[in-house]
Image: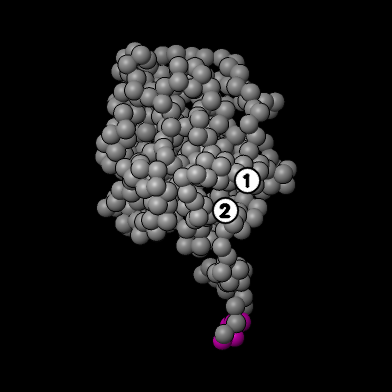
């Protein structure tokens, strides 16, 4: 942005693409808003809304969970870590890590722990592999360790384009880790959001079957928080609650005012939904949102607007305590001291 060899733009003219796109969204009212809802029809409306979002994202519920190889060992002298190499389809293999303390039968539930736009899932285990990792771990990235310390089973996996699943085959890959997969997914009739949701659905469905229907929650900050929220909103039988941070705010105030996330951009998404619809689809299940007052992307004041739009459906269902917005005093970061006490209230 600093280097501009071109003539000064005439007064009153707009040359940047974001300016005409800002005009396009000004008066846009999403078709899926669940504003007019009553107790007699809310289940039906939720169902049709979920189906439309699944179609828009290109969700695939037909992936197969096949275990190829497992390795179990003691981790950091006090945890049991189980690495599972899984195939979800041809050319689609990935490592999944389970972590817990003591015996499995004492676990209160299962936490799917996802990382945002960071180096990889290893951050959930407090592992340092890349130059910026010490800062992330010091800030509280170790979601899996935290979950195990609170007597939950933690599951963590690298999202598409990150960590061990970083793109290494394409000629001249883009600098942003997920942008190639995102645009290629759209070209193939899906979306990166849909592909990621497909994996979360398949994993959470396996967890329900494997662990005798223990409660399964989805956790994540930033981009991973968005994915956790949308997964929770769609998969009512597989995900029992979500706790997310640094990821809630209306699109016009957040993702459309900065560079792409590559995950939330879905064809026609702004025409069909805004973020409050995902909170509404969580009802009556628990939805905990943490937002920092100094967050430069998803600030607390923006999250409050979304939560306020979604609260009425929780009130109508007499589950007002199941929607919870927690104020963080810092920036776009982890808040483990706020997250775990809020989750424990539901167990």
Residue 129 to residue 314: above or below: above
* Residue in the foreground of this view, choosing between 39 and 72: 39
**Residue 51 rendering spot, x and y as whole percentages:** 62, 42
Pick out the residue farthest to the front.
Answer: 40
| Tag 1 residue | 52
Which stretch did the figure color magenta? 7-11
Q: Is residue 122 left or right of residue 180?
A: left
Q: Could you tell me what secondary structure mostly forms the magenta stretch?
A: loop
Residue 312 to residue 345: above or below: below
The reply to whether dot 1 and dot 2 touch (C-beta < 8 Å) is: yes
* Residue in the foreground of this view, choosing between 208 and 328: 208
**Residue 329 rendering spot, x and y as whole percentages:** 27, 53
* Residue in the foreground of this view, choosing between 121 and 336: 336
The colour scheme used here is one colour
Figure label count: 2
- The CA distance from mark 1 to mark 2 is 9 Å
- Say what secondary structure mark 1 lies in: helix
| Tag 2 residue | 32
**Residue 40 rendering spot, x and y as whole percentages:** 50, 44
């Amino acid at each position: 942005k600093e280097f501009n060899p071109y003539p000064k733009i005439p007064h009153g003219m707009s040359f940047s693409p974001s300016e005409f796109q800002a005009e396009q969204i000004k008066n846009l009212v999403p078709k899926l808003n669940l504003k007019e809802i009553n107790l007699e029809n809310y289940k039906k409306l939720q169902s049709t809304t979920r189906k439309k979002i699944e179609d828009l994202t290109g969700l695939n519920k037909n992936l197969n969970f096949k275990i190829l190889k497992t390795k179990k060992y003691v981790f950091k002298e006090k945890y049991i870590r189980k690495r599972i190499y899984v195939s979800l389809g041809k050319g689609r293999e990935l490592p999944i890590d389970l972590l817990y303390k003591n015996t499995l039968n004492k676990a209160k539930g299962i936490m799917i722990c996802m990382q945002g736009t960071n180096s990889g899932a290893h951050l959930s285990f407090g592992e340092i592999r890349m130059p910026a990792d010490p800062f992330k771990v010091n800030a509280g990235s170790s979601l899996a360790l935290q979950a195990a310390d609170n007597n939950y089973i933690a599951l963590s996996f690298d999202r598409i384009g990150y960590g061990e699943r970083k793109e290494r085959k394409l000629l001249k890959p883009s600098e942003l880790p997920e942008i190639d997969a995102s645009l290629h997914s759209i070209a193939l009739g899906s979306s990166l959001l849909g592909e990621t949701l497909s994996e979360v659905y398949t994993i959470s469905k396996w967890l329900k079957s494997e662990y005798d229907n223990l409660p399964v929650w989805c956790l994540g900050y930033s981009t991973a928080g968005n994915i956790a929220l949308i997964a929770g909103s769609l998969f009512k039988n597989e995900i029992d609650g979500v706790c997310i941070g640094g990821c809630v705010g209306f699109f016009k105030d957040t993702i459309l005012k900065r560079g792409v996330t590559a995950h939330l951009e879905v064809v026609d998404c702004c025409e069909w939904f805004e973020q409050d619809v995902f909170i509404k689809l969580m009802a009556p299940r628990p939805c905990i949102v943490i937002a920092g007052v100094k967050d430069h992307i998803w600030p607390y004041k923006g999250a409050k607007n979304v939560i306020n739009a979604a609260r009425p459906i929780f009130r109508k269902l007499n589950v007002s305590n199941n929607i919870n917005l927690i104020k963080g005093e810092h920036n776009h970061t982890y808040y483990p001291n706020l997250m775990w006490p809020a989750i424990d209230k539901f167990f």
